Image (cartoon, grey):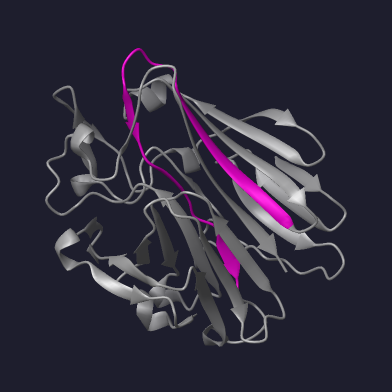
């Protein structure tokens, strides 16, 4: 079922399946900003990544000497959330552990995704992870929204990153992170969208929790989106290289894929979040549509 938020300027639709943002439409112009999820190209719109971001080495990890298997980006994106709060401009969705989740993720948790229209053209997204277990839990979380680039050619669009500085660029080898291959990314220069840049998967920048803004637009900025990232460790830019897809994902991450030399112990996982009993983690970003 689609849950709608409407502030008179934009209409937002969110599915209870995965608490996934599926549509943002300007009421005056009719412009749709989100990728429609064509299964021939990429069947998702804006999945929420939990309890891992990226891929585990061998799709497995260990906890208390037991091995568990989990596929890329975790299970939340394919789970049914409960709508626990709804107002004119706010929707709060909740996922809690179940017998099925416990078989692959042996932790008791509460994962909330909160959407809030904060002004005429801005949607805030808040992640809230609560440890309801009697021991520490370990997790990553992230967003994966896909924005349409519909009005002209893919390479007519640019990503402008602020602060304009040099960032550390993380490098994947296959699905896993190799910290020995870190490079430099100069954000003084706008990043033009070129499909060949995604041949080896995502462009990943290390943010280290610093507030960062990414603007997707054409040169004349006639329309686009601004993603305001509050405190994420990384941001990833991705589009499926081989499918000529008319969208780009701008992905705030509080975590990342396993390193190539990961030992498999989730307690040792690179960039993992550790949360004590009864404690709460939050991470947030917002999207302004213009």
- Tell me how many marks there are: 0
- Where residue 188 appears, as percent x and y from the top left, is 44, 80
Specify whether 234 is left or right of 47. Answer: left
Specify whether 146 is left or right of 133. Answer: right
Location of residue 214 with respect to 255 vertically, above or below: below
Picture quarter containing residue 122? bottom right
Residue for point 22% across, 41% down: 269
Q: Nearer the viewer, residue 212 or 47?
A: 212
Q: Nearer the viewer, residue 23 or 260?
A: 260
Picture quarter containing residue 61? top left
- Where residue 128 appears, as percent x and y from the top left, is 52, 33
Residue 271 seen in render: yes
Seen as rendered, the residue at the extreme top is 134
Location of residue 9 with respect to 58 vertically, above or below: below
Part of the protein shown in magenta: 122-148
Specify whether 91 is left or right of 141. Answer: right
Residue for point 84% across, 50% down: 7
- Where residue 22 appears, as percent x and y from the top left, is 64, 53
Location of residue 256 with respect to 31 vertically, above or below: above
What's the magenta bit mostly, secondary-structure-wise? strand
Q: Quadrant of the N terminus?
A: top right
Residue 35 seen in render: no
> Per the image, is 53 magenta?
no
- Where residue 106 appears, as percent x and y from the top left, is 31, 23
Location of residue 72 with respect to 86 vertically, above or below: below
């Amino acid at each position: 079922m689609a849950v709608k938020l409407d502030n008179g300027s934009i209409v937002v639709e969110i599915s209870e399946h995965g608490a996934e943002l599926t549509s943002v439409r300007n009421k005056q112009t009719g412009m749709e900003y989100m990728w429609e999820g064509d299964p021939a190209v990429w069947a998702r719109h804006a999945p929420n990544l939990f309890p891992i971001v990226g891929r585990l080495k061998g799709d497995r990890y260990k906890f208390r000497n037991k091995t568990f298997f989990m596929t890329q980006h975790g299970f939340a994106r394919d789970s049914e959330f409960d709508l626990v709060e709804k107002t004119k401009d706010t929707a709060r969705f909740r996922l809690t552990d179940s017998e099925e989740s416990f078989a692959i993720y042996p932790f008791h948790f509460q994962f909330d995704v909160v959407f809030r229209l904060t002004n005429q053209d801005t949607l805030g997204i808040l992640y809230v992870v609560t440890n309801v277990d009697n021991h520490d839990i370990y997790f990553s979380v992230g967003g994966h929204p896909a924005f349409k680039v519909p009005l002209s050619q893919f390479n007519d669009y640019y990503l402008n990153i602020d602060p304009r500085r040099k960032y550390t660029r993380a490098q994947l080898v296959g699905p896993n992170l190799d910290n020995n291959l870190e490079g430099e990314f100069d954000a003084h220069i706008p990043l033009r969208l070129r499909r060949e840049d995604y041949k080896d998967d995502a462009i990943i920048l290390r943010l280290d929790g610093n507030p960062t803004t990414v603007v997707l637009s054409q040169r004349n900025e006639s329309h686009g989106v601004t993603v305001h990232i509050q405190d994420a460790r990384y941001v990833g830019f991705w589009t499926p290289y081989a499918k000529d897809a008319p969208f780009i994902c701008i992905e705030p991450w509080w975590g990342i894929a396993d390193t190539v030399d990961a030992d498999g112990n989730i307690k040792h996982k690179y960039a993992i979040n550790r949360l004590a009993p009864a404690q709460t983690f939050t991470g947030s970003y917002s999207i302004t549509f213009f």
